[in-house]
């Protein structure tokens, strides 16, 4: 099987981490460069790959798969906005799963997703497209995640948790079983969430409370 050429959208920390997962699978992927919307980065080299231009240049490489490497608690909608703006066919979005992740057989992970080393899914679940799981994330039985969810390192979901589109779960947060995290909600790092979180709210603390 010939490795498919791949462009990484974004040239920051998540893109560099994703590149490590890509390079761990040379039979699947042949990374050719980064695309980033900061013009000051164009022409740079990052971890041995060039920054080829802005993300709109994805259309100049029709044979390359794409992976959206954008994640920020300050802009939790950025990845979904990027994928919507580019409007490329779904089969162009690559899903990158590091070989050191442990994913239960039967789990469905949507297109354009990134699962880094040490992430664990304990039982088959469905995860929406454009998902990001940073190292040592834990998802358990009966969880359900919408589109564009970000889970920072060591974020943990109890069983039966529902996470809405574009939600950002900060590093080391803990979500109790059978709760709902609303769309575009932000959970602060280290938070312990014991009740449902409405959409577009920011919660933090142990126990977590709304920040106003």
Image (cartoon, helix red, strand yellow):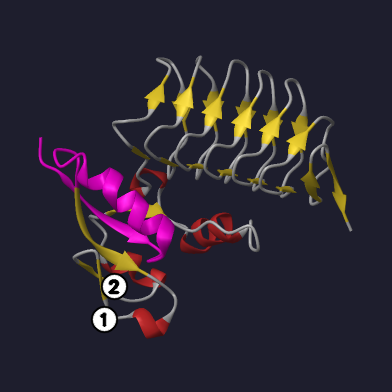
Q: Which residue is mark 2?
A: 51
Q: Secondary structure at mark 2?
A: loop
Quick one: which residue is furthest to the left in this view? 1
Residue stretch rendered in magenta on the structure: 1-29
Identify which residue is drawn at 26% across, 81% down. 43
Seen at 28% across and 31% down, the residue is 99
Judge whether 69 appears above or below 204 on screen: below
| Quarter where residue 42 is shown | bottom left
Q: Residue at x 36, y 80 (%)?
A: 41
- Where residue 14 appears, as percent x and y from the top left, is 42, 56
Image position, residue 5 (x, y; %):
20, 52
Residue 16 coordinates in the image, percent (x, y): 34, 57
- From this viewpoint, which residue is outermost toward the bottom? 40
Q: Residues within 10 Å of mark 2 (few under 14, many from 20)?
A: many
85 left or right, relative to 118: right
Residue 106, label in figure = none
Q: Is the N terminus in the top left, top right, bottom left or bottom right quadrant?
A: top left
How far is mark 1 from mark 2, CA to CA? 5 Å
Side of 179 where 10 appears, left or right: left
Q: Is residue 28 magenta?
A: yes
* Mark with earlier residue (1, 2): 1
Residue annotated with mark 1: 43
Snapshot quadrant of residue 63 = bottom left
């Amino acid at each position: 099987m010939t490795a498919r050429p791949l462009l990484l959208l974004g040239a920051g920390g998540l893109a560099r981490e994703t590149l490590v997962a890509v390079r761990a699978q040379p039979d699947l992927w042949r990374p050719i460069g980064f695309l980033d919307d900061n013009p000051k980065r164009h022409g740079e080299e990052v971890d041995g790959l060039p920054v080829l231009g802005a993300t709109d240049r994805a259309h100049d490489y029709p044979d390359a798969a794409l992976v959206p490497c954008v994640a920020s608690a300050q802009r939790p909608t950025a990845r979904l906005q990027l994928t919507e703006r580019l409007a490329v066919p779904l089969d162009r979005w690559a899903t990158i799963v590091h070989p050191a992740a442990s994913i239960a057989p039967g789990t469905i992970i949507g297109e354009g997703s990134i699962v880094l080393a040490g992430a664990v899914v304990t039982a088959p679940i469905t995860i929406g497209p454009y998902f990001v799981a940073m190292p040592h994330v834990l998802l358990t039985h009966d969880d359900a995640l919408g589109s564009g969810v970000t889970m920072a390192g060591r974020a943990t979901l109890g069983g039966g948790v529902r996470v809405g589109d574009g939600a950002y779960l900060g590093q080391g947060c803990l979500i109790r079983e059978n709760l709902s995290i609303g769309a575009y909600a932000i959970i602060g790092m280290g938070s312990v969430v014991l009740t449902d979180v409405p959409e577009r709210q920011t919660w933090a603390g142990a126990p977590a409370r709304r920040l106003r």
